[in-house]
Structures are given as C-alpha cells and as structure tokens.
Amino acid sequence: MPRRIKHAKPLIFVFCEGESEQAYTDFLKQRFANVAVIKRPSATGLFEEADRRFQKDPKFRDYAEVTDEIWFFFDVETKDIGKWEQRLAMIKRLRRLRRNPNIRVRLLMTTGCIEYWLMLHYKMFSPPVLEVADKERILAEVVAREASYVKGDYEATARIAERYPIAVEHAEKILCNLLSDGLPGLEDTDERNQWLCKQCKTFSTVNEAITFLEQLHR
C-alpha cells in the first residue's frame, strides 16, 4: 500500500544532469538538513527520468502525494532549445501528481556549464559560456581557485559551495540585468523559464533554490 506519511519538513526530489550537480545537491542536503528533506536518485537524468520514476518506481510514485517540490539541476545549452515544449508538458504532469497544492517544480539552470555557477561564488561576471572553449576557460578559472576540483568531486565542490551567499547575490544581480534584454520578469514562471531556456543568455537560477532553503530557517 502506498505510504502517505507526511514529512514535517518539505520533501524535495532533485534530478541532476551530471555528477557535479549531484555533488552540489549533496552539499545542500547536508547544509539544510534541519529544514528540508532533500533526496536525489543515484543515477543522473532529468525530465524523462523524473517522469518515468514517478510513474513506475514505487520509491518515487508512492511518495508523490507527500512530495513538496521537484528540482531539475541542469545546464542551458543551444542544443536543447527545441526540447522546451516537451519538457514543459512533463513539468505540468509532475505538478499534478499532488493536489491542494500542486507539487512545486523548480528549474536550477546555469548557462553552459555548472562551473559558471561555481565561479559566481568568487566573482560577479557574465561572459559567453556556450562554446567548448568558453566552458574550458571557466573550468580553468574554477581550478585556479580550487586546485583539487574535478567534476563530481564532493569535497572540492563543498569547499566552493561554502561561499554560496556570494553566489546568490551575484546571480540575483545578473538576472536583474537581463530585464533590459527582454526577460519577462524575475518571478519563477513558465514564461520566464521558457525565455531563459530559449535565449541562452548567461545566467544561473540556482540561487533561487538556495534562497528558498534559507527562508525555511525563518
């Protein structure tokens, strides 16, 4: 019989594109364990993975009614522009897994590569991050500040993530700057997220998930 035990803390499932996103999620899981229950699959995978898990995997399906939020942690790249409509259909389906209220779906997006989000922990900047050379340059900057960093390494990622208040401030400013480029608004809406996914400007919205977790402390 499906379990219907409601967690005292918000229950959040996080689906990650890669191992670096998983490592950062694990940092958030530990840092905010007193205010939220954060779970993630051991395997990587995004929208299709979540859709499949909540339909067929009892570990997810039976918790749908008590799931508060589902997060997708991924890079925004030009090759994925045509996937927005399909992804939005799955987002809407996932929201309806729980009623009164629906499940909240957040998109933790970063242009090009997660290393851009990591660099926001050190400085405010918004360079192009779509070409291979751009990503390699950002990765080199991260390694210059955290020499042991490699993708998926928890210890190195956690040392960088300790500076998350700086990254949150920088990411908020960058999103505000996009208003002059046509961003429909700062509120987390499907319209805004479609614009971000299709325009591929340099930005990150990981800050919004962290702000949510911080507000749970209050």
Image (cartoon, rainbow, N blue to C red):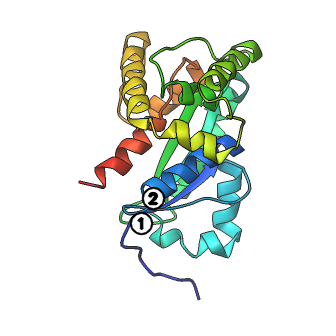
Foreground of the two, 101 or 41? 41
- Percent x, y for residue 32? 42, 56
Question: For mark 1, what is the residue?
Answer: 99
Q: Is residue 108 visible?
A: no
Q: Which amino acid lies under the numbered mark 1 shown in the image of this protein?
A: Arg
Q: Is residue 67 left or right of residue 43?
A: left
Q: Secondary structure at mark 2?
A: loop
Label 2 CA crowd tier, 10 Å (few <14, some 14–19, many 20+): many
**Residue extending furthest toward the bottom:** 1
**Is 138 drawn above or below residue 104 in the view shown?**
above
**Residue displayed at 36% across by 47% down:** 212
> Which quadrant is home to the C terminus?
bottom left
- Percent x, y for residue 96? 49, 60
Q: Secondary structure at mark 1?
A: loop
Q: Is residue 19 left or right of residue 159?
A: right
Q: Which amino acid lies under the numbered mark 2 shown in the image of this protein?
A: Ile
Question: For mark 2, what is the residue?
Answer: 103
Foreground of the two, 13 or 158? 158
**Is 126 drawn above or below residue 47 in the view shown?**
above
